[in-house]
Amino acid sequence: MNGELTRRAAEGYLAALSSGDRDQIASRVTEDFHNEHTSALGRSLHGRAAYRERLADFLAEFEELRYECEDLVVEGDRAALAYRMSFRWAGAAHRPLVRLRGVFRLRVRGGLIAHRVDYWDSAEFHRQTRPAE
């Protein structure tokens, strides 16, 4: 597969995640999309429809969500995308701006994300969202 197509798919997916539009985000993945989480807080799933459905809650909980690419390495139909994400978590009374770093490992098919493995530190999420003592 053309690495440029993979690069465009990865960059477009990241931009869609920052849009807050679940239809736009879901349009960037295949029908049989596999979303795999390594974090203790994440939940894996299969299928574009299931992903789109879960996005409603995710986008409501992670307000002002933004992703920024730190590094993108592409090889054929695979990409490793290091990111910084920021958001205000709706579940916190004090609602601080939370900043996390992570990595997506992506596999692209037909210009769409077919498989995503997401690596991020859920302990860091808790550290930033826990009320000050």
Image (cartoon, grey):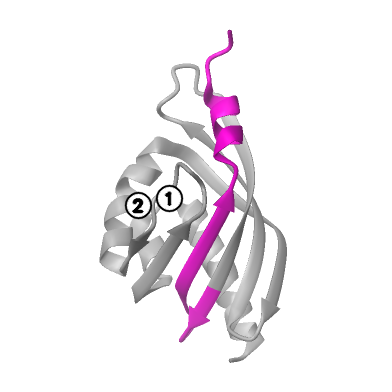
- Side of 82 where 125 appears, left or right: left
Residue underneath mark 1: 20
| Closer to the camera in the image, 67 or 119 | 119
In the rendered image, residue 70 lying in the magenta stretch gets the answer no
Residue flagged by tag 1: what amino acid is it? Gly
Q: Report the quarter where the N terminus lies.
A: bottom right
| Image height of 2 relative to 130, above or below | below
Write down the quadrant of residue 77 in the picture.
bottom right
Q: Which percent across, then down, holds residue 10?
A: 57, 70
Write down the quadrant of residue 96 in the picture.
top right
> What residue is at 40 percent from the left and 68 percent from the top?
34
Residue 55: mark: 2
| Closer to the camera in the image, 16 or 129 | 129
Distance, label 2 to label 1, CA atoms, is 9 Å
- What secondary structure is marked by label 2? helix
Write down the quadrant of residue 59 in the picture.
top left
> What residue is at 47 percent from the left and 84 percent from the top?
109
| Count of numbered circles in the view | 2
Residue flagged by tag 2: what amino acid is it? Leu
Q: Which percent across, then down, holds residue 97?
A: 58, 30
Callout 2–callout 1 Cβ contact below 8 Å: no
Magenta range: 107-133
